Amino acid sequence: MLTLHVEYFAILREQRGLTQETLTTTAATPTALYAELRARHAFTLPADRIRAAVNDEFVAATALLRDGDRIVFIPPVAGG
């Protein structure tokens, strides 16, 4: 089991109703963690639309998570 600190932005923050949370999980990768959170919180964005940063660095969807990591899920953002 890992204890992870998760931060949400934009639509994910709106759908979750929180900016951040600490949780315990067996998810080993950002993709697995997002799938778990998507099922739990009914996130509408599919995983292929999300980027993950772990400890302030963008990582591959298959990067291994470690206990205590801070994960930020970043949805696509419109700008002008």
Image (tube, rainbow, N blue to C red):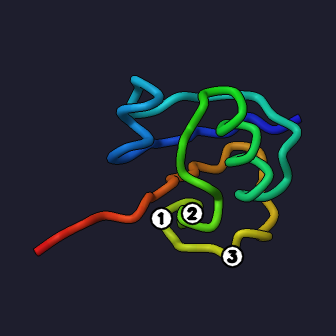
Mark 3 and mark 2: span between their CA atoms? 8 Å
Residue at 57 percent of width and 51 percent of height:
71
- In the visual, does 76 lie left or right of 27? left
Q: Nearer the viewer, mark 2 or mark 1?
A: 2
Residue count near mark 1 (Cα–Cα under 10 Å), binned few <14, some 14–19, many ≥20: few
- Tell me the amino acid under the disc marked 1: Asp
SS for callout 1: loop
Mark 2 and mark 1: span between their CA atoms? 9 Å
Pinpoint residue 13: horizontal percent, then vertical percent: 39, 36
- Give the numbered dot on residue 56: 1
Quarter residue 26 falls in: top right
- Give the numbered dot on residue 60: 3
Decide: is 11 above or below 57.
above
- Tell me the amino acid under the disc marked 3: Ala
Pinpoint residue 24: horizontal percent, then vertical percent: 76, 29
- Give the numbered dot on residue 11: none
- In the visual, does 27 lie left or right of 44? right
Residue count near mark 2 (Cα–Cα under 10 Å), binned few <14, some 14–19, many ≥20: many
- In the visual, does 46 lie left or right of 57? right
Pinpoint residue 44: horizontal percent, then vertical percent: 54, 43
Quarter residue 67 falls in: top right
Residue at 63 percent of width and 73 percent of height:
59
* Circles 2, 1 touching at the beta carbon (< 8 Å): no
Residue picked out by circle 2: 52
Of 76 and 61, the residue lying toward us: 76
Pinpoint residue 18: horizontal percent, then vertical percent: 41, 26
Quarter residue 48 falls in: bottom right
